[in-house]
Image (cartoon, rainbow, N blue to C red):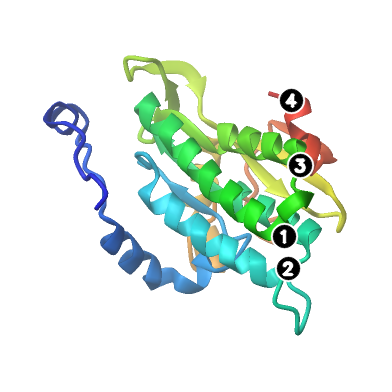
């Protein structure tokens, strides 16, 4: 059984109590259809070491396996599963105020992804893709204050650096991935507009499919998804 409390001190200082696996899955079942979409985006603003995010990733990787499997074929195509698995992990976001939680969350997500990668791609795995996934996790799971939307230092105090998130997409129907960087503050402002919620029926971190209610773009990169760690920060 997963530990729900690491220490009384952490509970007192940060209100840190982890949600049990049974409750996590019960809550995710309420949005089951979204958790089984490879590209559906999820943000956990107090992710801890990832109890919600790891279960979301497991569901997404199963969906990636189905999506990468040709009709009447039980096994996915390795190159297609690799791409779909990158889409799956790049659509998961988390913020936590404690650095040890952030590092643990990234590692848990990576290990789950790597196990599925090996199981479905066997001897066609490669180190470039592994490095790309680690880079994505370094940008998607961040140490910050989800209330102030700022990064924090080792003492959990706000810095002058805003939280920046990257939107990852494959708009070209090939191996090129597009990365767009936005500030978390801009994303929240756009997501919470009444017009956006009316159109989508829910909050949306990034622009909708029609490009409406798009927050201010900070940076944009386009490159092969296996080489994303070689560009930008």
From the viewer's perspective, tell me whether residue 214 is left or right of residue 200. right
Number of other residues with Cα within 10 Å of mark 3, as a class: few under 14, some 14 to 19, many 20 or more: some
The image shows residue 51, relative to residue 208, as above or below, that is above
Instruction: State if disc 1 and disc 2 touch (CB < 8 Å).
Output: yes
Residue closer to the observer: 186 or 10:
10
What residue sits right under mark 2 in the picture? 76
Q: How far apart are marks 2 and 1 (CA)?
A: 6 Å
Give the farthest residue toward the bottom.
Answer: 72
Q: Mark 3 points at which residue?
A: 126
In primary-sequence order, the first of circles 4 and 1 is 1
Give the position of the C terminus as an image quadrant: top right
Please tell me which residue is depicted at 43% across the width and 57% down the height of the picture.
55
Foreground mark, 3 or 4, reads 3
- Residue 228: which quarter of the image? top right
The residue lying at 16 percent from left, 34 percent from top is: 11
Query: Which one is closest to the eye, mark 2 or mark 4?
Result: 2
Residue 206 in picture, x, y percent from top left: 61, 50
- Look at mark 4 in the image and give the residue it sits on: 232
Give the spatial CA distance, label 2 vs label 4: 32 Å
Quadrant of the rendered image containing residue 219: top right
Is residue 42 in sight in this rendering? yes
Give the vertical position of 164 relative to 159 (above or below): below
Dot 2: what SS?
A: loop
Q: Position of residue 43 (x, y in %)?
A: 47, 49
Q: Residue furthest front?
A: 123
């Amino acid at each position: 059984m997963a530990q729900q409390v690491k220490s009384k001190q952490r509970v007192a200082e940060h209100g840190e109590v982890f949600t049990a696996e049974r409750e996590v899955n019960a809550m995710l079942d309420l949005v089951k259809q979204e958790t089984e979409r490879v590209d559906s985006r999820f943000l956990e603003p107090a992710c801890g070491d990832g109890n919600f995010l790891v279960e979301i990733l497991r569901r997404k990787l199963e969906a990636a396996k189905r999506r990468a499997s040709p009709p009447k074929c039980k096994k996915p195509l390795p190159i297609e599963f690799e791409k779909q698995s990158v889409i799956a992990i790049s659509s998961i976001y988390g913020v936590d105020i404690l650095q040890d939680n952030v590092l643990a969350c990234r590692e848990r997500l990576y290990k789950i992804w790597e196990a599925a990668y090996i199981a479905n791609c066997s001897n066609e795995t490669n180190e470039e893709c592994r490095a790309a996934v680690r880079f994505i996790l370094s940008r998607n799971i961040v140490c910050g204050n989800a209330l102030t939307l700022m990064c924090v230092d080792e003492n959990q105090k706000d810095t002058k650096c805003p939280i920046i998130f990257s939107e990852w997409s494959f708009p070209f129907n090939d191996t090129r991935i597009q990365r767009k960087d936005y500030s978390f503050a801009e994303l929240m402002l756009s997501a919470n507009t009444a017009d956006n919620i009316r159109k989508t029926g829910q909050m949306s971190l990034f622009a909708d499919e029609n490009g409406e209610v798009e927050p201010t773009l900070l940076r944009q990169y386009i490159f092969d998804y296996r080489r994303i760690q070689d560009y930008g920060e």
